Amino acid sequence: MKLTGRVLHLVGNADKVRDQLSGGTPSLEGEDYHYGVNTDAMISGRACTLGYTGEILGPYFLENFLEAVDKDDVRTGGFQVAVGGHAYGSGSSREVAVVAHVGAGIELVVADSFQRIFQENMVYAGMPFTTDRGVLARLEAGEDVDLAALATELPDFFRAVSEAGGLMAYGTLLENGEVEPTYATNAPARPLNMVEKIIANKAWAGGDAFGLADVAPGDQVLCRAAFRGMHEYTAGMVMDLYEQEWGQADMFRPDLVAAFEDHFVLISHETVPDAVKDSRLAPAMKLTEEMVEACDRFGVRLHGPGRAFKAGVCHRIVVEDYALPGDVIVLTDSHTPTAGVMNAFAFGVGSTAMAFALKTGLIPVTVPKVVRVEVSGEAKGVLSPKDLILHLIGMPYFREEHWRTGPTDTCVVEFAGPGLDQWNVDELSVLTNMTVEGGLMTGVVAPCAPILEFLKTRRDIDATDLLVDADEGASYARVMQVDLDDVPLTVATPGDSRNRAPLAEHTTVGIQNVVIASCTGGSISDLRAAADVLRGRSLHEGVRLTVTPSSADVAKEAEAEGLLELFRSVGAVVSAPGCGSCIGNGPGVPLPGEATASTTNRNFARRMGAPGPVYLVSPAVAAATAVTGTLADPRSL
C-alpha cells in the first residue's frame, strides 16, 4: 500500500477533526487521541438497521463523532488511514463497524490498542491494522508498505486465518480435515483458574478429540461451543456469510442455536418519537424478515412476540433457559457475558465468527488473563451489583488496561467471595454483563449458592457436579480484595461506562428522563428494587419514567406481583419486553433537552437514539431520581 489518500487522526479535539474533514492539515502537537472510539460512533444503531454491506454503510462511518462529522464526510474526504488512541473499537460486537471502515475507503487502522471483539472482527474479515505507529511514519515517508506482512506479527491462529483468506475459508479447510490445531495439545498439566479450566475442557485437540491438560494466557485455541445465538441486527449478515461459504449445508447442533427478535420489537411503540420511527422502523423490519426467513430455511428456533419461543432480551433468555455451568456460550452481541453469571464462559463475537461457529461448532478463543475479584462485606439493603461493577471498571487498573502487555491480550474477571451470596442470579448477572464495558472479554461467577438455587428453582437442575472452580495454586494477573463498605453508590457520567463517580457528588444533576430496562435493569429483582422506592410516592413534575421488563417470564411475574400496575399508577410507560431505548429503539429515547438516568449498561453519545447526557445508575437510584427530579440516593427519601 502506498499512501495516495489522506490520514484521519481521531483526536479528542472536535475542532481539529472538523479541520481535517474540511481538507486542512492542522497541527496535532499536544493533542490526545480520543480514548475508546467506540463502535456506536463508528456506525450508529440507526445506520445498522439499513444493512450490512460497505456500499450501504460507508457514508455513515463516524457520523456525529464528537458532533463534528456529517454523513459521508469520511468517504468523500479521500481518507485512506484511520488513526486512533487506546481502546479503539470499544462497545458493541457489531462487525458492521469494520464494514463501515471499508465502505468509507479506509484501508488501514492504526491505534494504540484495540478492543478484543473489534480486533477479532478485523482479523476474520481481513481488515489490516497495527499498533505500530512506525508503519504510519513509513507510509507518510512514501514507502510502499506490505499490509499483508502485518499478519505475520499476529499470533499463530490469527496468522493461519489470514493465510487461509479469512475465517470462513479456514472453516472450510477445517471441515475438510485439512488443518490441525495451531497450538500445542500436549502441554503438561498445571493448576488452572476457572476460565482456563473451562477453555481447556472444551478445547479441540485435533481430529475428534477434545480436552487439553493446560492452556495459558495468550494461547489461541478452538473450543467446542454450546449455545450460539444472534438477533435481528446481526442474523442477516451471519446467514449471508454462512450461505456464501456453505450454501444450505446443515449447521452443527442446530438444537443449540437460537435467534432473537428483541432489538427492534419496540420501535413502533406509541411513545417513540416519530423521527426515530421514520428513520429506523422500515429497514429494521426488513432485517427482521431476513432473520425469520433464515430461521425457517435452517430450522433455527426463533424467540420473539408471537413466535414459537418466548419473547425477551436474548441475554436474559439465555440465562433463564440455556446457560449451564462449564459451557462456552457465544452470541453476536457484546453483552453475552451476562451468562457468565451461570459459571459459564460466555462472550460476544462478530458475524463471521458466528457463521463459523454455526457450521463447525467451534469458536476461536484467545486465552485471557484473569483477574480474580474477591468480594466481602454487606450491601446493607441499598448497594447493588450495578454500583460495584461501575466502581470496578472505573478503576485505573481496568480503565487504563494495566493488565495489557501485548496488542492481542484479553482479560476476564473471575468474581468470587462471600459477598456474592447476598445477591441472586438476576443481580449478579449485572456484574458479568458489564465487564465488557470495562474493555474486558467477560466475567465469570465462581460456584456459589445463588447459581445452584436458580437452576434448581427455574429448571429443576441439580448443578452441583457441573460447577467449575479454580484449582488450588491457580495463577492470576491480579487478585483484588473488595470490601463493599468501601464501595459508594456509584454512577457513570455521560460518554462512557468507565466514567465512574460517587453518586453523592452528582445529586444536584437535574434529570427529566428515567429508564428502568435492559439486560442490566429489567429483571424481576430490578423491578422489585425500583418498586420498593416508588411505592407510596409520585413522579417529580417534568420527569418521564419508562419501564421495560427483560423477558416474558419477568413481565408475567411482575404483573402477578402488582409491580407493573404500581409503575402504571405513578404514570410510568410500561412496555412489552425488549431491548428498547438502550440502543435507541424503543420508549425512553431522550427528547430534546433531556438528561437521562438509565439502568442500561452503555452511555455512549447518542447511543440511546438522540443527543443528551446519559447517567448510568442502579434501579433503586433510578426510581429515587424519578421521584426527586435529580440524581438521588434512595436513602434520602
Image: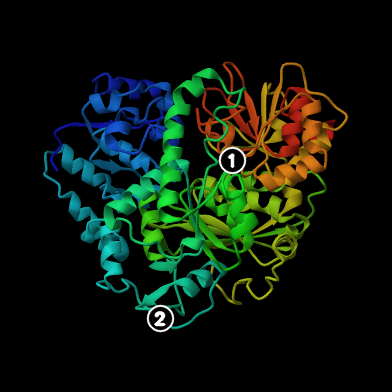
Q: Nearer the viewer, mark 2 or mark 1?
A: 1
User: Looking at the image, how many numbered discs can be counted on the residues?
Assistant: 2
Residue at left offset 22%, top offset 53%:
150
Q: Position of residue 179 (x, y in %)?
A: 27, 71
Mark 1 lies on residue: 601
User: Is the residue 235 above or below the residue 194 in the image?
Assistant: above
Q: Position of residue 196 (x, y in %)?
A: 50, 69
Residue at left offset 17%, top offset 31%:
5
Mark 2 belongs to which amino acid? Ala
For residue 445, the mark is: none
Q: Dividing the image into 4 quarters, which one contains the C terminus?
A: top right
Q: Is residue 247 left or right of residue 599?
A: left
Task: Specify the quadrant of the image occupied by residue 40.
Answer: top left
Q: Nearer the viewer, residue 415 or 299?
A: 299
Residue at left offset 65%, top offset 36%:
576
* Residue situated furthest right in the rendering: 536
Residue at left offset 35%, top offset 52%:
352
Q: Nearer the viewer, residue 623 or 190?
A: 623
Mark 1 belongs to which amino acid? Asn
Q: Position of residue 171 (x, y in %)?
A: 30, 63
For residue 187, the mark is: 2
- Residue 588 in view in this figure: yes
- Residue 113 in view in this figure: no
Q: Dividing the image into 4 quarters, which one contains the N terminus?
A: top left
Mark 2 closeness class: few <14, some 14–19, many ≥20 residues within 10 Å: few
Q: Position of residue 476 (x, y in %)?
A: 54, 66
Q: Are marks 2 and 1 in contact (CB under 8 Å)?
A: no
Q: Secondary structure at mark 2?
A: loop
User: Is the residue 49 above or below the residue 315 in the image?
Assistant: above
